[in-house]
Image (spheres, helix red, strand yellow):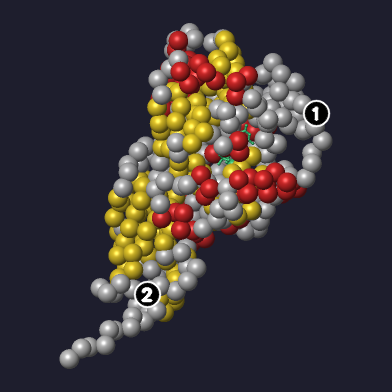
């Protein structure tokens, strides 16, 4: 659905969202008025398992479409057909809730040197919400789909684009049928407009871009979306085949119809020449202490370090903490809810000495893939991995390095209580 619409200044939209969110999010760079981007306002957000809606980052490229839910339908196409109304989606199928850690594939982009284009995120573009909706697997089979292998689900957003591209993303149909939902509530509230009202796709554990907002059409296809593969005007494959793929500078990735390896990290290790941003790479953030003010140890001399760790489709195996900038490491304890596709909380009792300290967290997933230390120089590409570095890539995608996400903490001397007697 491409409409012609002059691009007005996006700052109005950003201010409106910031206002609706009661100032709970900070504005990041709005590159060339192309992206509406708001990041979590506080590092402390990452000491909670559930991210409040006001702290959940926002990221999209086009204007938010004005949609009347009563009149909205989701079209089915490809090996399925029909239109489903919002009322059907809500009442005709089972209702489920899934936890999903949404991370913009551009999270950490601002840590690349030299700088890459677009929004210079630090670590603010990650959040966990509980999304309520209808399983994709409930909707699709009843509309006539047989074998899911080697098929893709292409989801098209209803956001109008003034550059005449369609916001279309393809995921393997097996993933879609496994745990994806069409969501209409977020943390128990009606879906906010900026998060995709009235309905969006949730792909648990997969980078934000796969989670198409304002869903207009679901298509079962024999390949990923490629240029010219949709029966629509405009450019079809930009968001799947050009943007959101990892590659060195000056390279234009080949559009592929399919890939045998889905896991993003496995693609990066060499399975796919220019990886797609599918499930999130292993990553962690310390939420508290947050470095905004000095901390005083508790009576036992310790400070609790608390944060979150996630790894897309894969479980978190281990989180380590360094309180000396990475020289030595100790295991943190994992605790709290444990849902696939959502982050785990970790905590560590730090016997904190007065002074300044650089705290780092380092997570390892169940396949023993550990966050690399830094982001490489632009020429290293895949060779970076063997040196414990994340490959600098031109789009600044999928970064998960340890050091850029660290936090500097000042610890105060404990005032010993005056001894009585
Ligand atoms: N239709 C549509 N869906 C979209 C986008 C978009 O521009 N259009 N942006 C994607 C990107 S890049 C991200 S990171 C997530 C962000 O979801 P959120 O704003 O709810 O956090 O939405 C995704 N879904
Ligand atoms: Mo994103």
Image quarter of residue 351: bottom left
Residue that lies at the very extreme toward the left in this rendered image:
421
* Relative vertical location of residue 387 with respect to residue 359 in this rendering, above or below: above
* Relative vertical location of residue 357 with respect to residue 43 in this rendering, above or below: below
Q: Secondary structure at mark 1?
A: loop
Q: Residue at the location (65% across, 58% down)?
A: 114
Query: Quarter containing ligand 1?
Result: top right
Residue 383 position, x and y percent, is: 52, 50
Q: Quadrant of the N terminus?
A: top right
Residue 346 position, x and y percent, is: 34, 54
| Circle 2 residues within 10 Å: few <14, some 14–19, many ≥20 | some
Q: Residue at the location (64% across, 33% down)?
A: 239
Inter-mark Cα distance, 2 to 1: 57 Å
- Residue highlighted by disc 2: 296
- Give the side of residue 54 with respect to residue 283, left or right: right
- Residue highlighted by disc 1: 4
Residue 218 position, x and y percent, is: 57, 20
- Give the side of residue 72 with respect to residue 4, left or right: left
Q: Inspect this view and state whether residue 134 appears.
A: yes
Residue 285 position, x and y percent, is: 44, 55
């Amino acid at each position: 659905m491409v409409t012609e619409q002059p691009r007005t200044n996006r700052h109005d939209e950003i201010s409106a969202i910031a206002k609706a969110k009661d100032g709970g999010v900070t504005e990041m760079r709005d590159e060339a008025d192309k992206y509406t981007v708001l990041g979590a306002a506080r590092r402390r957000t990452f000491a909670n398992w559930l991210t409040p809606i006001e702290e959940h980052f926002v990221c999209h490229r086009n204007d938010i479409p004005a949609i009347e839910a009563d009149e909205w339908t989701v079209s089915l196409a490809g090996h399925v057909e029909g239109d489903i109304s919002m009322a059907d989606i809500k009442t005709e199928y089972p209702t489920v809730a899934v936890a999903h850690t949404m991370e913009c594939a551009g999270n950490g982009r601002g840590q690349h040197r030299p700088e890459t284009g677009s929004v210079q995120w630090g670590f603010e573009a990650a959040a966990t919400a509980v999304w309520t909706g209808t399983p994709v697997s409930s909707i699709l089979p009843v509309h006539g789909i047989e074998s899911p292998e080697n098929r893709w689900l292409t989801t098209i957003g209803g956001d109008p684009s003034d550059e005449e591209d369609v916001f279309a993303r393809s995921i393997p149909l097996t993933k879609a049928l496994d745990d994806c939902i069409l969501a209409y509530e977020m943390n128990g509230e009606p879906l906010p407009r900026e998060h995709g009202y009235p309905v969006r796709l949730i792909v648990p554990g997969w980078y934000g871009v796969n989670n198409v907002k304002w869903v207009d059409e679901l298509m079962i296809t024999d390949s990923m979306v490629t240029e010219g593969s949709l029966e629509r005007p405009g450019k079809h494959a930009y968001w799947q085949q050009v943007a959101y793929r990892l590659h060195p500078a000056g390279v234009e990735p080949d559009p592929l119809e399919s890939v045998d390896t889905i896991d993003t990290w496995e693609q990066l290790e060499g399975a796919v020449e220019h990886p797609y941003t599918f499930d999130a790479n292993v990553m962690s953030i310390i939420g508290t202490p947050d470095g905004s003010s000095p901390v005083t140890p508790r009576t036992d001399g310790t400070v609790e370090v608390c944060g979150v760790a996630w790894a897309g489709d894969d479980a978190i195996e281990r989180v380590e903490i360094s309180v000396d900038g990475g020289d030595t490491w100790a295991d943190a304890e994992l605790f709290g809810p444990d849902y696939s596709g959502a982050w785990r909380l970790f905590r560590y009792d730090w016997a904190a000495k007065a002074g300044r300290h650089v705290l780092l967290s380092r997570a390892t997933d169940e396949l023993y893939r550990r966050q690399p230390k830094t982001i490489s120089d632009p020429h290293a590409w895949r060779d970076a991995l063997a040196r414990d570095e994340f490959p600098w890539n031109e789009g600044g995608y999928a970064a998960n390095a340890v050091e850029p996400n660290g936090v500097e903490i000042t610890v105060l001397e404990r005032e010993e209580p005056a001894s009585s007697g």
